[in-house]
Image (tube, grey):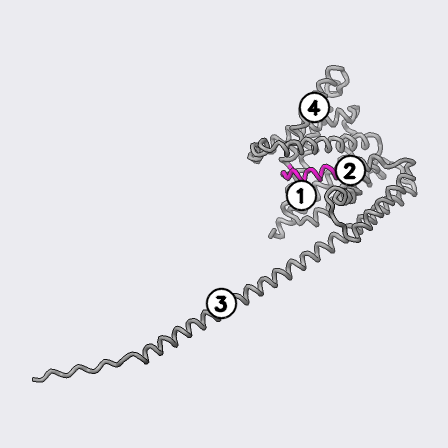
């Protein structure tokens, strides 16, 4: 049971993580004129360096030896790394191409896509409210497709890639920092090879834009690792239901940046589509909170019932012990009554 102080600390870590993820669209344009692929390669390379330093500081290396004995898990990590590469690359390209609002939509609908994957791949059964939320989300995508004149493919790729990444992460079952270390280790050599090739062809920007540009590219490792470390600190301190609510902070900030800072267009049909998505998320959140409250109440009832049963068994055991003691006492009394009384010995005669 976490104390109030720990939960408040966890809440601050969680808010910090999701706010940083929500404000990251302000960072990627600073790396131009680097293209999205070059930024992505730097993110992979520098992230591994930051994570290695963090693991050294925390002395968390024991998982590596165990991981190397599990080739199936290594293969899953490679697939997860490939999936998050697609997610990162598309997101960076979308932000630097002026499509922040469409990118934010991808993270809004991600929980709904995760539910759909659970039904299709894991054969999970949905409650009525979850079916309603997924149905509304499908209608929202259709409305947005009409508004954009095309399917919102950036949103769909981001949502599907991140949901798939989450599915593999669940199977890998590694901590956030350890998982990022393993994934960036898999991606390190291809990313480094790509950067070497860019330099050899003269297309790299790291040597032509000054030391400030180099520092910004190197800081992609911090931009990747610091929010994840904060998220890991939050995950062990606050309930999962609270983390589920906090996850909407990131796309909210991204959406607000898109329409206020980047001044992206929001015609009526896009507002309609986003409103439907928000309605679906409201239903989903309400159902999750209601289910969590019901499960918590049922757990408390079961615990109270078990406590009453234990108390009754203890009382019954005490009664049986008292009865046994009483029987033993009565038996001792009867034994004393039945014992022969010894005759007094005659006094000696003088």
Question: What residue lies at 81% left-to-right and 47% top-to-bottom?
Answer: 134
* Label 1, residues with CA under 10 Å away: few <14, some 14-19, many ≥20: many
Going from N to C along the chain, the mark reached first, 3 or 4, is 4
Real-space Cα distance between discs 3 and 4? 69 Å
Is residue 248 at least partly visible in the picture? no
Does the residue at mark 4 contact the one at mark 2 (Cβ under 8 Å)? no
Q: Picture coordinates of residue 312 (x, y %)?
A: 55, 67
Q: Residues within 10 Å of mark 2 (few under 14, many from 20)?
A: many
The span picked out in magenta is 159-176
Q: Residues within 10 Å of mark 4 (few under 14, many from 20)?
A: some
How far apart in space, not on screen, are marks 1 and 4 (Cα)?
33 Å
**Residue drawn at the location 70% of the way across and 23% of the way down:** 190
- Whether residues under marks 2 and 1 lie with C-beta atoms below 8 angstroms apart, the answer is no
Q: Which residue is mark 3?
A: 317
Q: Nearer the viewer, mark 3 or mark 4?
A: 3
Question: Residue 300 lies in what quarter of the image?
Answer: bottom right
Residue 333: in sight, yes or no?
Answer: yes
Q: Quadrant of residue 251?
A: top right
In the rendered structure, does residue 309 fall within the stretch colored magenta? no
Helix, strand or loop for disc 1: helix
Q: Secondary structure at mark 3?
A: helix
The vertical placement of 207 against 135, above or below, is above
Left or right? Give the position of 67 relative to 250: left
Q: Nearer the viewer, mark 1 or mark 4?
A: 4
Q: Quadrant of the C terminus?
A: bottom left
Q: Secondary structure at mark 4?
A: helix
Mark toward the viewer: 2 or 3: 3
Tell me the residue that label 2 is attached to. Answer: 160
């Amino acid at each position: 049971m976490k104390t109030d102080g720990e939960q408040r600390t966890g809440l601050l870590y969680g808010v910090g993580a999701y706010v940083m993820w929500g404000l990251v669209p302000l960072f990627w344009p600073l790396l131009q004129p680097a293209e999205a692929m070059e930024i992505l390669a730097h993110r992979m390379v520098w992230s591994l360096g930051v994570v290695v330093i963090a693991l050294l500081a925390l002395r968390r290396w024991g998982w590596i030896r165990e991981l190397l004995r599990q080739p199936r898990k290594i293969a899953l990590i490679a697939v997860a790394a490939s999936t998050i590469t697609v997610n990162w690359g598309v997101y960076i390209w979308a932000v630097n191409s002026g499509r922040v609002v469409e990118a934010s939509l991808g993270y809004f609908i991600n929980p709904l896509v995760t539910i759909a994957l659970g039904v299709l791949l894991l054969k999970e059964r949905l409650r009525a409210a979850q079916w309603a939320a997924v149905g509304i989300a499908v209608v929202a995508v259709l409305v947005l497709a009409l508004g954009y004149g095309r399917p919102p493919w950036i949103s769909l790729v981001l949502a599907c890639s991140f949901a798939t990444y989450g599915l593999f992460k669940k199977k890998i079952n590694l901590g956030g920092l350890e998982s990022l270390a393993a994934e960036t280790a898999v991606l390190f050599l291809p990313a480094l090879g790509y950067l070497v090739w860019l330099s050899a062809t003269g297309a790299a920007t790291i040597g032509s834009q000054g030391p400030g540009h180099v520092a910004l590219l190197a800081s992609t490792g911090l931009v990747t690792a610091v929010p994840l470390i904060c998220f890991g600190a939050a995950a062990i301190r606050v309930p999962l239901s609270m983390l589920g609510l906090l996850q909407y902070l990131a796309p909210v900030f991204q959406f607000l940046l898109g329409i206020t800072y980047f001044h992206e267009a929001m015609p009526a049909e896009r507002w309609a589509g986003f409103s439907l998505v928000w309605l679906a998320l409201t239903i989903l959140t309400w159902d999750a909170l209601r289910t969590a409250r019901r499960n918590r109440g049922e757990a408390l009832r079961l615990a109270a019932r078990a406590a009453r049963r234990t108390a009754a068994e203890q009382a019954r055991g005490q009664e049986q012990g008292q009865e046994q003691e009483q029987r033993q006492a009565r038996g001792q009394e009867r034994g004393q009554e039945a014992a022969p009384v010894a005759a007094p010995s005659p006094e000696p005669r003088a």
